[in-house]
Amino acid sequence: MTHIGRPFDKKAKKITIRQDDSVDAVVSYLQRKLRIKFVVPQFHVNGDDQGIHDIDTSINWLIQDLRSRKIGGIYLPNTRWFAGEEDKGENLQRFVIQLAGLADVYVNDAFGSWQSHASTYHITKYLPSYAGLCLQDELCHVKLVLQPARPFVAIVAGAKYDTKIGPLTEIYKKVDHLILGGVMYNTYLCAKYGIKIKGVQESDIELAKGLVEQDKTEKKIVELTHLIESDTLEGRKDGQFRVISIKDFAPGKDYNYVVDVDPTSFEMDPCKSVLSSAETIFVNAVMGLMPHFWHGTSKMDEVIDNNIKAQKFFGGGDTLQEFKSLHPKLYHEALHSPKYYLFTGGGTVLKVIEEGDPYGLEIVKALMANKESQQQLHASHNHVNAHGRLA
C-alpha cells in the first residue's frame, strides 16, 4: 500500500478521488519489473467527497487467490482515499483494525511518509512491525546530513513559505550557507527589499521578516542575483518574460511572476564559489516553474556536479524527477556514485533536521516501540514456558 498526492482537503474535510491519484501506474511498473500479477481491489466510495469508509470483505477472495498463488500480490487503493487514513476518531480506528486484519506483519519502507497516519503509524499498534531495507538505508544516510563535513550548503525551494518555516529555521542554524528557490525565495526577497511579486502572500512576507533580520547578522543566505520575471504562468511565451537583477530592487517596486533563476546566477559569485567550495550539499529544490522554466534547475545541477569532492544529497519526489528528466545520464551515474545519495523524501530530511534526530520521527519511534513490546511479549512467553517445564 502507498499514498499518492493529497486527495484530502484538510480545510474542507473532503476527499477527492481522481484517476491521476490512483496506484495503477505503480502497479503497472511493479508488474513489469517483478513479472508477477498484482490486483487492486475495488471498494465502495461513500458519496462524492467522503472517500472509502471500509475495506470490503470481498478482499478475502483475493487473499485466497494470493495464498493459492493465482496472483502475485494485492495492492490496496491509494491509502489517502480512505476516510480513516488522516482521521483522528472512529474512522481511524476502524480503518487500522481492518488493515491489521489483512496481514501477519507490517513493514514500513516509505521514508518519504513521515506523517503519523493510519497506514504509517497507528498500524504498528496491531501487528509485529519492521523497517524496510530502503527506510533503514535512508535513516543511516540522513545522519550524514545531521553531522556534515563543512562547509555545509543547503538548497531549499518550495511553493509556500509558511509550510516550511519550522524546518527552514532549524536548517538555517545548522548550515554554513543557505540558497533559497521558488516562491520561498520570492517571499524572502519581498521581505528584504520591500518589493511586491505576484503570487506572494502578505502573511508569508511577514513570516519571512524574521529570517531577514536573523541573516543581517549571520549572513548565511546566498542570494541568486538574476531571475526570470514572466507576465503569465501559462508558459514560456515570447516577449512575456525577461531577466531581472536584484540590484535593481527598491522599496515599493512591483514585479510580475518570478518563475525561475537565470542560469548566470549559478555561474557567478557568490553562488559559484559557495557551491564549488562546499564539502556537503543538500538539495531539496526545483528552481523554476516546470515544465517551461527549467534552465535554472538544470544549471544548478551542473554546477553542483562540478564539485567532485563534495558529498551531495538530493531529496524529494519533485527534485529527483526533475534531476532525472533534465540530466538522465548524470541521474543514473548518481544512483551508483559514492559522492551522491538520493533520498526518496526531501521533506522528511527537512523534518529530521528540524527534529535533530533521525530516530525522532514519529513513524520510526512507533517501529521502535513495537520492537520493545514484541521483545517483552517474547520474554514473557519464554518465562511462562520455562515455568511450565519446571512444573
Image (cartoon, rainbow, N blue to C red):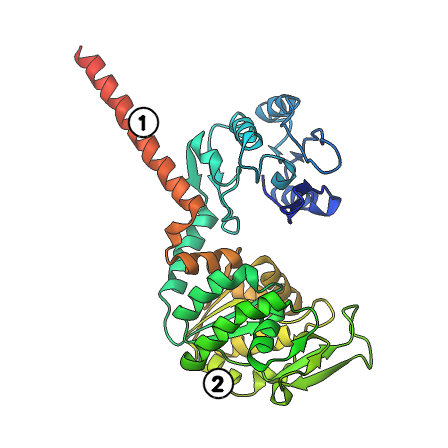
Tag 2 residue: 273
- Residue type, label 2: Ser
Crowding around mark 2 (Cα neighbors within 10 Å: few <14, some 14 to 19, many 20+) is few
**Does residue 304 appear to the left or right of 40 in the view shown?**
left
Crowding around mark 1 (Cα neighbors within 10 Å: few <14, some 14 to 19, many 20+) is few
Residue closest to the eye, 217 or 237? 217
Tag 1 residue: 377
Note whether 290 is above or below 374 in the view shown. Answer: below
Q: Quadrant of the C terminus?
A: top left
Counting from the top left corner in percent of width and height, residue 320 is at: 59, 62
Q: Residue at x 68, y 41 (%)?
A: 15
Counting from the top left corner in percent of width and height, residue 218 is at: 41, 79
Residue closest to the eye, 385 or 179? 179
Instruction: Please tell me in which quadrant of the rendered image residue 35 appears.
Output: top right
**Does residue 19 appear to the left or right of 80 in the view shown?**
right
Note whether 277 is above or below 11 in the view shown. Answer: below
